[in-house]
Amino acid sequence: MSNHKAINIKDKFSKFDDLWSPRVIAAMNDYQFKLAKVEGEFVWHSHPHTDEVFIVIEGSLCIQFRDGEVQLTAGEMFVVSKGVEHKPVAKTPCQIMLIEPKGVVNTGEVQSELTADNDIWV
């Protein structure tokens, strides 16, 4: 009997509804692949020790910076460099994948009502 099984991203998204609360679906070395449903504005924050990858699975996402912004639609990705302050915004419901080291808190060093529990698997 084989232990090989694909991870169905659409199925994983169906298992939770919380906004801005990333869920881990896989790990590779010290990195985690996380899914999140987002809508509205997040908080300004940075991750001083790591880059952060955003991949839009469905919908569109704007990542604001103090000196500009990047617009992403389904199938696009962007890497936010470590230490760069940013604020994700989704005007309509959006599904994203994040790739970052295990232990990274979604709001960085900022404590907020949007700070999510870490390392929650789905």
Image (cartoon, rainbow, N blue to C red):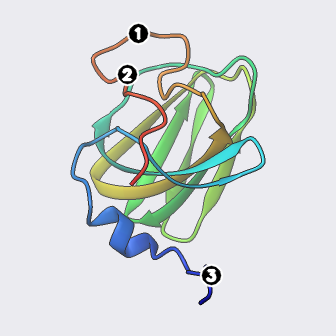
Residue at the disc numbered 2: 115
| Cβ atoms at labels 1 and 3 below 8 Å apart | no
Residue pictured at 55% horizontal, 80% vertical: 6
Residue at the disc numbered 3: 4
Around disc 3, counting alpha carbons within 10 Å, would you say few (fewer than 14), some (14 to 19), or many (20 or more)?
few
With respect to residue 11, does 27 lie above or below?
A: above
Residue 7 pos. (x, y %): 51, 74
Closer to the observer: label 3 or label 2? 3
Name the secondary structure under disc 3: loop
C-alpha gap between disc 1 and disc 3: 39 Å
In-front residue for pair 41/71: 41
The quadrant the N terminus occupies is: bottom right
The disc, 3 or 2, on the residue closer to the chain's N-terminal end is 3
User: Residue 5 got which mark?
Assistant: none
Residue pictured at 54% horizontal, 11% vertical: 109
Around disc 2, counting alpha carbons within 10 Å, would you say few (fewer than 14), some (14 to 19), or many (20 or more)?
some
Residue pictured at 38% horizontal, 58% vertical: 95
| Cβ atoms at labels 2 and 1 below 8 Å apart | yes
Residue at the disc numbered 1: 111
